[in-house]
Image (cartoon, grey):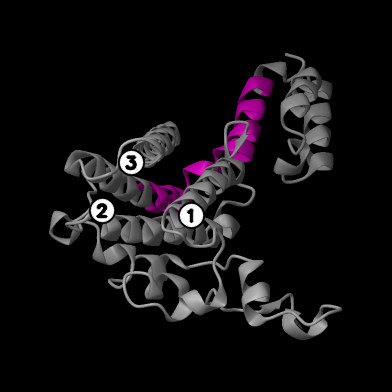
């Protein structure tokens, strides 16, 4: 077994492979000592434990919980768009095409998250649905709820980025997977907003809208926030910018508790 060649090959697909080991120096010292002692029979056991420690951390309960939380939101969105298509009120042409495509994306997100959780020896949540009692009776209001779901999803993924940082599924970064979904959810949000005749970004004034939209843009850090990295952008930029300009340039996070509150997605899922 050529451990050095294995690590070299791993580094070609995972540049952080050495950083996953507790101590690079300790790893190579132990390998050297093992060789000197002629204890080559023990080498496979040592190597197996080494890589289990480096790549086995993704089975932690907290990571599975984060992925199941994301899966719950994706199931909620997938079922909402399924209900929207089944209601047969979406105008034919571009609107129907957009809603059908977004539904396909949500189904793909559900499969990816479910497969990832299973691969990590976790149990993916199933059966989460959009509460039929709260499904809007008309197409116009259905689009309003779609906007609320998409804008919530974008902020929810952003809120969990820190929990997934450095977490791996084999050689795949879970943060990378989450950000790939996050960017598509952001496109959904912008498109739905455009379908409603809104700007594709979120202005500060949206934080005071009535339900179901208003609560989506509030939170510990509301979408009306104009301060980034300690700088009030309405004062620090070289020319005067309005609060709407500063707020629309950034998206803010929502915590898990905020997302699952009854005034937001938690009040829509069964």
Q: Which residues are magenta?
A: 43-71
Residue 203 appears in view = yes
Q: Is residue 137 magenta?
A: no
Q: Which mark is residue 124?
A: 3
Nearer-N-terminus badge (3/1)? 3
Give the side of residue 117 with respect to residue 233, left or right: left
Q: Is residue 54 magenta?
A: yes
Q: Nearer the viewer, residue 26 or 150?
A: 150
Residue 126 appears in view = no
The residue that disc 2 covers is: 139
Q: Residue at the spot x=35%, y=55% of the render?
A: 146
Q: Quadrant of the N terminus?
A: top right
Q: CA distance from mark 3 to mark 2?
A: 32 Å
Give the side of residue 146 with respect to residue 131, left or right: right
The residue that disc 1 covers is: 194
Q: Which mark is residue 28?
A: none
Q: Residue at the spot x=80%, y=23% of the render?
A: 8
The number of callouts visible is 3
């Amino acid at each position: 077994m050529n451990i050095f060649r294995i690590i070299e090959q791993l580094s070609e697909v995972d540049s952080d492979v050495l950083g996953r080991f507790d101590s690079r120096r300790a790893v190579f010292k132990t390998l050297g000592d093992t060789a000197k002692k002629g204890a080559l029979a023990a080498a496979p056991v040592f190597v197996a434990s080494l890589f289990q420690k480096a790549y086995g951390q993704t089975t932690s309960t907290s990571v599975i919980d984060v992925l199941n939380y994301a899966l719950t939101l994706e199931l909620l969105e997938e079922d909402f768009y399924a209900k929207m298509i089944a209601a047969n009120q979406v105008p034919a042409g571009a609107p129907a095409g957009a809603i059908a495509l977004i539904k396909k994306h949500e189904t793909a997100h559900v499969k990816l998250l479910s497969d990832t959780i299973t691969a990590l020896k976790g149990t993916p949540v199933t059966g989460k649905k959009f509460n039929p009692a709260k499904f809007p009776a008309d197409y116009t209001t259905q689009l309003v709820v779609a906007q609320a779901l998409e804008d919530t999803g974008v902020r929810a993924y952003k809120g969990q980025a820190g929990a997934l940082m450095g977490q791996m599924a084999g050689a795949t970064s879970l943060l990378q997977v989450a950000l790939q979904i996050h960017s598509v959810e952001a496109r959904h949000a912008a498109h739905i907003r455009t379908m409603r005749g809104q700007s594709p970004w979120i202005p500060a004034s949206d934080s005071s809208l009535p339900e179901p939209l208003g609560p989506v843009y509030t939170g510990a850090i509301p979408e009306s926030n104009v301060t980034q990295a300690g700088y009030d952008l309405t004062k620090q930029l070289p020319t005067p910018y309005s609060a709407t300009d500063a707020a629309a340039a950034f998206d803010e996070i929502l915590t898990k508790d905020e997302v699952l509150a009854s005034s937001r997605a938690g009040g829509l899922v069964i």
